[in-house]
Amino acid sequence: MAASLDAHATAAVDSSGQFGEVLDLPVHLRDALWRVDSARLAPVDASQGLVVAGMGGSGVGGRLALGVIGNRLKRPMTVAQGYALPAWTSDEALVLISSYSGNTEESLSCYEAAADRGAARLVATTGGELAERARADEVPVIPLPGGFQPRAAVGYATVIALEAATLCGAAPSLRVEVEQAAALAERLVGEWRPDAPEDNAAKQLARRIAGTIPVVVGAELTAPAAYRWKCQFNENAKLASFSSELPEADHNEICAWEDPDADFTVLLLGDPGLHERNAARMKFTGRIIEDAGVAVERVDAQGESPLERLVSLLLLGDLVSLYVAVLQGVDPLDIAMIDRLKRELADA
C-alpha cells in the first residue's frame, strides 16, 4: 500500500485527474445553476410530477435530489434506472432524461418512451445521440461540460434534478441551499484534499477501510448518499461494496452480522435531521455489529441545510473512495469490466 496519500502519491495513480474533478465540486454546483438558466426553461404544469431517467453517475443525481427534497416534496418524484418508465407516466408528467455521454441505451429508450406517453421532456447531456434527438424534436437541452468521467458530474446531475423538480412544481426552489452547499464544500475541500495533512478525516477513513469490504448504511437523507458511496467504491477503487437503508436493514440484514465470514467495514452515515427513532436505530445497530467483531465507522453529515449535509457526505465519500484506490494502487479511471460488458452487448 502507498506510504503516503499526498499530492505526489495520488497523482502517480490517478492518470486522468479524478481527484481534481472531485475537488471542483463547489464549482460544479454553481455552474449547474448557470447552465440551467442558460437553457431558458419554461415552467411545466406537471400534476403527475417528475421522473428522472438515468443510469450510473447520471441517474444517481435523481436519488440524491429526492433525498434532499425529503418532506418538502409537493408532487410525485421517482427515479427510473432502466429501459422503461413507470407505467403511470403520462402527458401530465415531466421526464428528465439525464445521460452524460448522450449514448446510454437505457436513457435513449426512456426518451422515446416519454415521447410515446406524451410527457414533457427535458434532457441533460454533453451531446451524443440523445442531444441529436432532442434538438430534432425541439426538446430543451441543458448542456453539460465535457471531459469528465460521468460519475464526476454528480454535482451537475443533482442540481439539475432539483431544478427540474422546481420547474414542474414538485418541489420549492432550493437555489439558496445550492449556494450554501457550494460554500461549505469549498471549506471541506481545503481540509480533505491530497495536499492537506496526512491525518485529515478522508485519508484516515480510507486507511481504515482499505483491504475490507465496505457496507454503507444510511437513513432518510443519508440513504442515497450511502448508495453513492457504494458505487464510488465499486468504480473508483474496484472494491466489492454494498449499501443498505435503515430502518429496513434492521428487519433482515442485521441477522447476517451474527457470524460474518469476510472482512467487512460497516460505515454508518448519520445526520442530525434524522427521525429520532432512526437515530436510535443507527446507534444500536452499530453497537450490535461491533459486538459481533465487525469494524464500524460512524460518519456524520456537516452543515445546516439538507443539501449542505448531503454535499458534505458526497464530497467525503468520493474522496475516500479515491484515497482507497491510491492505497491499493488502482487507477480510478479504469472501468475495464464496464467496457467489456458494453462490447458484448453491442455484439449481441
Image (tube, grey):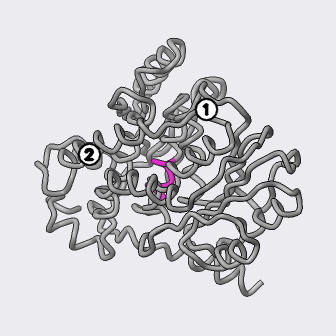
Span highlighted in magenta in the image: 228-234
Q: Residue at x 18, y 44 (%)?
A: 191
Which quarter of the image is occupied by the C terminus? bottom right
Relative to residue 246, is residue 210 depicted above or below? Answer: below
Asked whether, in this view, residue 143 is left or right of residue 195, the answer is right
Which quarter of the image is occupied by the N terminus? bottom left
Q: Where in the figure is residue 301, as x and y percent of width and height? A: 37, 31
Query: Image quarter for residue 103?
Result: bottom right
Q: Where in the figure is residue 29, as x and y percent of width and height? A: 40, 51
Q: Residue at x 49, y 20 (%)?
A: 274
Q: Residues within 10 Å of mark 1 (few under 14, many from 20)?
A: few
The tag on residue 132 is none
Name the element at disc 2.
helix
User: Residue 340 or 71: which is nearer the viewer?
Assistant: 71
Asked whether, in this view, residue 295 is left or right of residue 62, the answer is left
Asked whether, in this view, residue 130 is left or right of residue 111, the answer is left
Residue holding disc 1: 253
Q: Residue at x 49, y 37 (%)?
A: 174
Three-letter code, disc 1:
Glu
Q: Where in the figure is residue 101, as x and y percent of width and height? A: 57, 73
**Residue 61 visible (yes or no):** yes
**Residue 298 visible (yes or no):** no
Residue 238 forms part of the magenta stretch: no
User: Residue 317 or 63: which is nearer the viewer?
Assistant: 63
Three-letter code, disc 2:
Ala
Name the element at disc 1.
helix
Q: Where in the figure is residue 37, as x and y percent of width and height? A: 50, 55
Query: Image quarter for residue 7?
Result: bottom left
Residue holding disc 2: 202
Q: Residues within 10 Å of mark 2 (few under 14, many from 20)?
A: many
